[in-house]
Amino acid sequence: SPFPYFTLGTIVRGFGRGSKELGCPTANLDETTVENLPTAIDEGVYYGWAQLLTKTNHEIYKMVTSIGTNPFYNNEKKTIETHIMNEFTNDFYGEQLKIVLLGKIRPMKTFQNLNELTSAIQQDITAANCELNSNRCRQYLNHSFFKK
Ligand code: ADP
Ligand code: MG
């Protein structure tokens, strides 16, 4: 199993669709972080923990991460996109993000319409929330990876 998979990346700009069209902002990680992914982490939707490395906040949040080419949008480039399950009042482009992937929710697939995509995302968030409440997942909150 490729889990747990720990990585750190810089948050870059994407197409800006997450928040506007889907009501679900995703922090896109830089190209080098995408290139370093092991082949065992294939295209799909994953759950785990995320920690933004800002000066003031080192909190660890639940997250869902989509890895792939976003077939619904016919993108060519593979991306790693993390939706942090918390409401923020600000953007954090250029900041660093630590993530640990702990399991896979589903393979990547395309959808008939935006409604179907949006409801799949909501189901992914519900599934991630449920998995992350387990002791198996909660133990990673104390992992040295998240210490300064
Ligand atoms: P982009 O295509 O540039 O990634 P998105 O619409 O996906 O644009 O929005 C992502 C950006 O929104 C992130 O880079 C981050 O700065 C900000 N953001 C605000 N709240 C969140 C959140 N809960 N999870 C992820 N990113 C968030
Ligand atoms: Mg995004």
Image (cartoon, grey):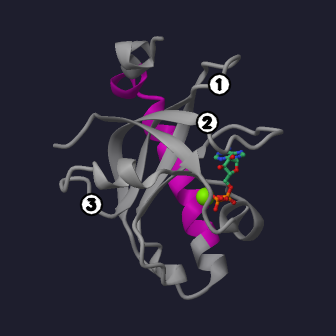
Could you tell whether 70 is left or right of 115 in the image?
left
Question: Is 106 drawn above or below residue 1 in the view shown?
Answer: below
Q: The residue tagged with tag 1: helix, strand or loop?
A: loop
Return the residue at label 2: 95
Q: Residues within 10 Å of mark 3 (few under 14, many from 20)?
A: some
Q: Nearer the viewer, residue 57 or 107?
A: 57
Alpha-carbon distance for marks 1 and 2? 7 Å
Q: Nearer the viewer, residue 7 or 61?
A: 7
Question: Is 58 drawn above or below residue 1 in the view shown?
Answer: above
Could you tell whether 123 is left or right of 106 in the image?
right
Q: Work out whether mark 3 precedes mark 2 in sequence or the reverse, and give the earlier one.
A: 3
Q: The residue tagged with tag 2: helix, strand or loop?
A: loop
- Image quarter where the N terminus lies is top left
Q: Position of residue 131 (x, y in %)?
A: 43, 38
Return the residue at label 1: 54
Mark 2 close to ligand 1, CB under 8 Å: yes
Q: Nearer the viewer, residue 19 or 107?
A: 19
Alpha-carbon distance for marks 3 and 2? 25 Å
Q: Residue at x 77, y 66 (%)?
A: 20
The answer to whether residue 33 is magenta is: no
Magenta stretch in the rendered image: 118-138
Q: Amino acid at mark 2?
A: Glu
Q: Residues within 10 Å of mark 1 (few under 14, many from 20)?
A: few
- The image quadrant that residue 107 belongs to is bottom left
Q: Residue at x 21, y 50 (%)?
A: 38
Q: Nearer the viewer, residue 100 or 98?
A: 98
Count of numbered labels shown in the rendering: 3
**Secondary structure mostly taken by the magenta-highlighted segment of the chain:** helix
- Disc 3 to disc 1: CB gap under 8 Å: no
Return the residue at label 3: 42
- Disc 1 to disc 2: CB gap under 8 Å: yes
